[in-house]
Amino acid sequence: MSFYSLFASKGPSGFGYTSTAKEVTAGLSLEGKTILVTGCNSGLGQEAVRVLTGRGARVVATARSAEKAEAACRSFSGKTIPLACELAEPASVRACVEAVKQKGITLDAIIGNAGIMALPKLRQAYGYELQFFTNHIGHFILITGLLEQLAADGRVVMLSSSAHRMAPGGGIEFDNLSGEKRYWSWRAYGQSKFANLLFAKELARRFAGTKKTANAVHPGSINTNLTRHMGTVSTFFADHFGPLFLKSVSQGAATEVFAAVHPAAAGINGAYFDDCNVAKCRRDADDPVLAKKLWDVSERIVAELKI
């Protein structure tokens, strides 16, 4: 139990900081539901799949390789479909999309959970900074490719983060998507999470007039394997003092699961969730012009990849 949890209270949804994924799905039957979760083999994604399958859902569980997805799925007791989806490799993402389509799967929800965080040195994929490309472009290719598979009342949930507040002024440095002009690991990570948030906002706008929804969530601060790229000192403090101020993985998975399946989240569109409740994001993340620009730029990037 973290120190903060001693003072945390529940919000209007009836859930809050200490709620777990298991608690937010208590009493729910997800039989007949199919949900796609990226990053199924560790951390929040693994916990989300464990809880969702435990409630009866069939989960399309993706990881960077088929081997990792299959190994993860062997640890779940429920119904799963393991698929490879390496978000930094567009061909892998497209293959995942085609596999879902060929199987004729209708998705009740998509949880864009996978990601990388705070790479200490600039790394690139196809000429773009790797966190932006993996966390945003990879999910952009996947989710836009699967929109026809989304149920009439389907939900898209993007894992953003409170780190979106660390994004540069203006949110997205469109003139520096390569990261070569300037690079700071946390600002780049914040930009990728800002992009996840803008993507959900623009997708929500495009869903207007339908029963489909798109939202973004902040899972909380959790000591998962995302921290593997942090420096030695930061990792030491996370490992030794994390229990005092970090959520457990089960608590961290609660908000994405809540937004994806809970009846109280039905019909909420274009929101930012924190601790299983609608919260405020950075003001410029609500800018529809900026969200539309990111969508257009993302489409151009994908077109240039020629996949």
Image (tube, rainbow, N blue to C red):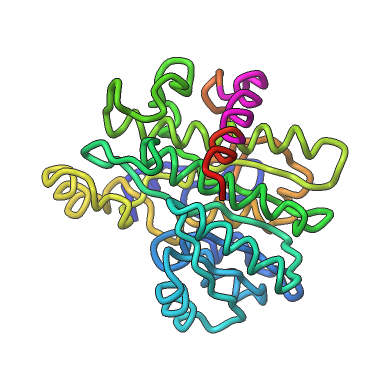
> Is 42 displayed left or right of 29 in the figure?
left
Stretch of the chain drawn in magenta: 285-299
- Rendered position, 291 above or below 128: above
| Spot occupied by residue 229 in the image (x, y as percentages of width and height) | 23, 48
Q: Is residue 292 magenta?
A: yes
Query: Is residue 119 left or right of 295 when viewed as pictured?
Result: left
Position of 18 relative to 79 (above/below): above
Query: What is the residue that sits farthest to the top in this orientation?
Result: 169
Q: Say whether residue 220 is left or right of residue 32.
A: left
Report the magenta stretch's main SS: helix
Residue 175, x across and y down, in percent: 43, 19
Residue shown at 74% from the left, 45% from the top: 213
Residue 233 within the magenta-colored segment of the rendering: no
Residue at the (38%, 57%) spot, across then down: 248
Front-most of residues 204 and 122? 122
User: For this rendering, which residue is in front, 160 or 236?
Assistant: 160
